[in-house]
């Protein structure tokens, strides 16, 4: 089953993502590396929210981003509670999905216009998982630029050498 192959990767990536989110210092939540960039809190909140998109991919036929808005978390406790809730809901949705359901087409919309349509499993892998990993990597750069130790993700980091 597809879910049995995906869930171990999901669990690993979510555990790594949580470690990065745990490191975000509240006194740097407004910091951004460039005027066009997310603030640290906005980027971390975006990551915490993206996890829940897996629920929409599994449970709905489409998602319209036009009315979608995110309010940045104001504390580490709020950020981690949001992430934990969303990761748990996403895992449950994935664990309950059949191969047949994951093979069905799902669409991303903007104001009712289709931006993309592909099998649910492809959306989960790219739109949710890879997208989360991409932004998590951005957040590790934010941490590095603020002298916050970067956690190990795919092996030891420069800050966690043995």
Image (spheres, rainbow, N blue to C red):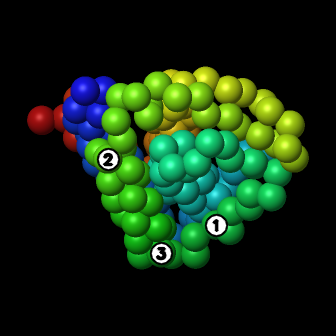
Q: Mark 3, residues whose alpha carbon is within 10 Å: few (<14), some, or many (≥20)?
A: few
Answer with left or right where residue 128 lies relative to residue 42: left
Q: Does residue 72 show up?
A: yes
Q: Is the N terminus in the top left, top right, bottom left or bottom right quadrant?
A: top left
Please tell me the numbered disc located at residue 78: 3
Which SS class for mark 1? loop
Dot 1 or dot 3, earlier in sequence: 1
Q: Residue at x 41, y 71 (%)?
A: 81
Q: Marks 2 and 3, how far apart in space?
A: 27 Å
Dot 1 or dot 2, earlier in sequence: 1
Mark 1 highlights which residue? 72
Q: Is the C terminus in the top left, top right, bottom left or bottom right quadrant?
A: top left
116 over 98 or under it: above or below: above
100 over 72 or under it: above or below: above
Please tell me the numbered disc located at residue 110: none
Q: Mark 2, residues whose alpha carbon is within 10 Å: few (<14), some, or many (≥20)?
A: few
Q: Mark 1, residues whose alpha carbon is within 10 Å: few (<14), some, or many (≥20)?
A: some
Q: Marks 1 and 2, how far apart in space?
A: 30 Å
Q: Residue at x 34, y 36 (%)?
A: 98
Q: Nearer the viewer, residue 29 or 114?
A: 114
Q: Does residue 158 show up?
A: no
Mark 2 highlights which residue? 96
Quarter location, residue 115: top right
Q: Nearer the viewer, residue 148 or 20?
A: 20
Q: Nearer the viewer, residue 17 or 116?
A: 116
149 over 24 or under it: above or below: above
Of badges 1 and 2, nearer the viewer stands 2
């Amino acid at each position: 089953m597809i879910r049995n192959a995906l869930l171990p990767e999901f669990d690993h990536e979510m555990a790594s993502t949580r470690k990065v989110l745990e490191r975000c210092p509240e006194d740097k939540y407004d910091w951004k590396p460039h005027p066009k960039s997310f603030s640290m809190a906005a980027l971390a909140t975006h990551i915490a929210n993206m996890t829940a998109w897996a629920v929409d991919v599994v449970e709905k036929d489409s998602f319209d981003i036009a009315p979608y808005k995110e309010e940045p978390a104001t504390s580490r406790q709020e950020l981690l509670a949001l992430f934990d809730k969303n990761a748990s809901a996403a895992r449950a949705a994935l664990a309950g999905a059949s191969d047949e359901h994951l093979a069905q087409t799902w669409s991303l919309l903007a104001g009712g216009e289709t931006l993309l349509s592909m099998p649910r499993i492809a959306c989960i892998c790219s739109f949710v998982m890879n997208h989360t990993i991409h932004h998590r990597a951005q957040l590790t750069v934010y941490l590095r630029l603020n002298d916050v130790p970067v956690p190990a993700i795919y092996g030891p980091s420069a800050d966690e050498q043995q």
